[in-house]
Image: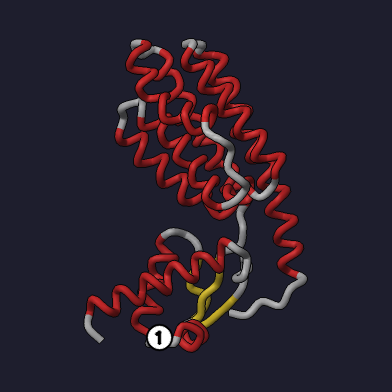
Amino acid sequence: MTKAKSVKLAERIYHALKNDIFDFRLMPGAHFSESDICERMSASRTPVRQALFWLEHEGYVQVYSRSGWQVKPFDFTYLESLYDFRIVLEREAVRRLCTMAPQNCRAHLEPLVSFWITAPRMAPGKALSLEDEQFHTALVRASGNEEMVRVHVELTEKMRIVRRLDFTRDDRVAATYSEHARILQAIEQQQTEEAQHILTGHISQSKDEVRKITLHRLQQASLQPVSP
């Protein structure tokens, strides 16, 4: 197998395993071997190991024993600290947006207003979860600080495994649309404290809800047979 084909196969295995982790087909704390993955993916050890190293770097798996691996158990304290860090970054981004010249602020907000206020609502699911991520990243990007954007994108990736669960229920989707609209309207009116207040409540509520949903999903998944 050429190097290019091996890398492409490693990418396919990486995405397949990551989806299994996100969808709780590979449970937090589950153990598996490289041989298990090789057999399942009909692949040699080299691309499998490369995929696992990528997942390890991102914090989804860890080495358990020689040639053995484990899906990292959930650490809710750590995940909640990421939510708190998001609040700090996004509150600062909102502050900067509110102090911009109105025409510049509107230019940043127009695509967000179009999606979250004007356009028809999307159904719950992964696609809407990604739109939510883009909403929050867009607020930070509008701050003009690329280092803030880089850190925010990293936080988003680390939180995705639980954050996407906030878009599996109609009531949570409705709340997200409503709160995004209120945040945008407060920014447009340059009401800094109000926009920050709504944003903080929005992220804090999401943090609480995804913890409940995650625990429920874990309980459900634990009742089902899971193959490595």
Residue bearing mark 1 = 43
The quadrant in which the C terminus is found is bottom right
Which element carries disc 1, helix, strand or loop?
A: loop
Residue at image location 43% in from the left, 59% down from the top: 58
The percent position of residue 206, horizontal first and vertical second, equals 64, 38
> Going by the image, does 185 lie left or right of 54?
right
State the colouring used for the structure image: secondary structure
Residue at image location 44% in from the left, 40% down from the top: 134
Q: Is residue 127 above or below residue 116?
A: below
The percent position of residue 94, horizontal first and vertical second, equals 45, 22
In the image, what residue type sits under mark 1?
A: Ala
Image-quadrant location for residue 108: top left
The residue carrying pointer 1 sits among few (fewer than 14), some (14 to 19) or many (20 or more) residues within 10 Å by Cα, namely some
Depth check: 53 or 164 in front? 164
The quadrant in which the N terminus is found is bottom left
> Going by the image, does 149 lie left or right of 132?
left
How many numbered marks have been drawn onto this rendered protein structure?
1
Residue at image location 75% in from the left, 64% down from the top: 220
Image-quadrant location for residue 200: top right
Depth check: 132 or 50 in front? 132
Residue at image location 69% in from the left, 47% down from the top: 169
Depth check: 182 or 94 in front? 182
Q: Is residue 145 above or below residue 81?
A: above
Q: Is residue 114 above or below residue 159?
A: above
> Going by the image, does 40 lie left or right of 102?
right
> Going by the image, does 216 lie left or right of 113?
right
The percent position of residue 157, horizontal first and vertical second, equals 46, 50
The percent position of residue 222, horizontal first and vertical second, equals 73, 69
